[in-house]
């Protein structure tokens, strides 16, 4: 019939629940380790820890960097003066592009997991919050600048304040500017639906 749109049902949703979108990224973290996924519906916010996936993806690249360090140590111990001077410089120059390449590849693979919401919703959930449990959503954008320590720019966050003030705020750290913008769109979509949730943003 004209005017009707067929949507493939998503496993893990309640009857009549509308899927708004999901994002998984190595540039998100809850706690010390990177790798996190967030799913938004018109009723809930669902979070997933993805740190194991992120660590598995980065392991080969970390091993390559470790091998370079081992070569430097062995050559330094061998007493070859010229190599002892040059290898640390080579290692430093190689470490930067390897780190960038590692982040990009692992991010591309992990971000694709959000394209299959049914599989994402099958994962073990780190948090599950209903709309009526949430008092406020507060976002701070990460800086656009890059430096040697933070390839994704200075850190931002999403803080979720619950109506039950006995519970601690939930903070999801954000390092990437593009990832922040995508998450921001989902937060706006979620918060603007009835009953509305207060959403604020720091510049």
Image (cartoon, rainbow, N blue to C red):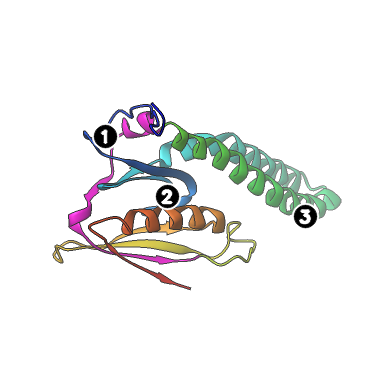
Q: Is residue 45 above or below residue 55?
A: below
Q: Residue 90, image x and y in percent? A: 78, 50
Which residue does the image show at 79% across and 48% down from the upper left?
79
Give the mark nearer the N terminus: 2 vs 3. Answer: 2
Q: How far apart, in angstroms, are the residues tagged by discs 2 and 1?
A: 28 Å
Viewer-proximal residue among 106 and 91: 106
Quadrant of residue 160 within the rendered picture: bottom left
Image x and y of residue 190, in percent: 33, 53
Q: Which mark is residue 13?
A: 1
- First along the sequence among labels 2 and 1: 1
Is residue 76 or residue 102 the one in the foreground? 102
Q: Residue at x 73, y 49 (%)?
A: 91
Query: What's the distance in space between the residues labelled 3 and 1, CA to CA?
Result: 53 Å
Magenta residues, as a range?
Answer: 117-141
* Label 1 element class: loop
Position of 11 relative to 25 (above/below): above
Compare residues 166 and 6 and report the one nearer the observer: 6
Residue, disc 3: 89
Query: Whole-Å distance between the Cαs marked 2 and 3?
Result: 29 Å
N-terminal of the pair, mark 3 or mark 1, is 1
Q: Say which residue appears at 61% left-offset and 44% top-offset.
A: 104
Along the viewing direction, whichever of 202 and 166 lies nearer the viewer: 202
Q: For residue 57: magenta?
A: no
Q: Secondary structure at mark 2?
A: loop
Q: Which residue is mark 2?
A: 33
Q: Judge left or right: residue 189 versus residue 160.
A: right
């Amino acid at each position: 019939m004209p005017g009707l749109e067929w949507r493939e049902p998503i496993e893990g949703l309640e009857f009549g629940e509308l899927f708004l979108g999901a994002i998984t990224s190595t540039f998100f973290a809850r706690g010390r380790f990177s790798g996190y996924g967030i799913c938004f519906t018109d009723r809930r916010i669902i979070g997933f820890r993805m740190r194991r996936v992120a660590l598995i993806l980065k392991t080969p690249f970390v091993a390559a960097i470790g091998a370079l360090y081992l070569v430097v140590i062995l050559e330094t111990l061998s007493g070859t003066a010229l190599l002892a001077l040059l290898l640390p410089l080579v290692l430093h120059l190689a470490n930067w592009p390897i780190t960038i390449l590692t982040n990009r590849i692992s991010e591309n693979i992990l971000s694709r997991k959000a394209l299959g919401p049914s599989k994402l919703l099958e994962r073990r959930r780190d948090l599950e919050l209903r709309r009526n449990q949430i008092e406020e959503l507060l976002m701070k954008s990460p800086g656009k600048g890059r430096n040697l320590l933070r390839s994704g720019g200075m850190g931002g966050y999403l803080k979720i304040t619950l109506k039950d003030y006995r519970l601690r705020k939930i903070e999801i750290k954000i390092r990437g500017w593009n990832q922040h913008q995508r998450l921001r769109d989902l937060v706006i979509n979620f918060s603007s639906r009835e009953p509305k949730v207060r959403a604020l943003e720091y510049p």
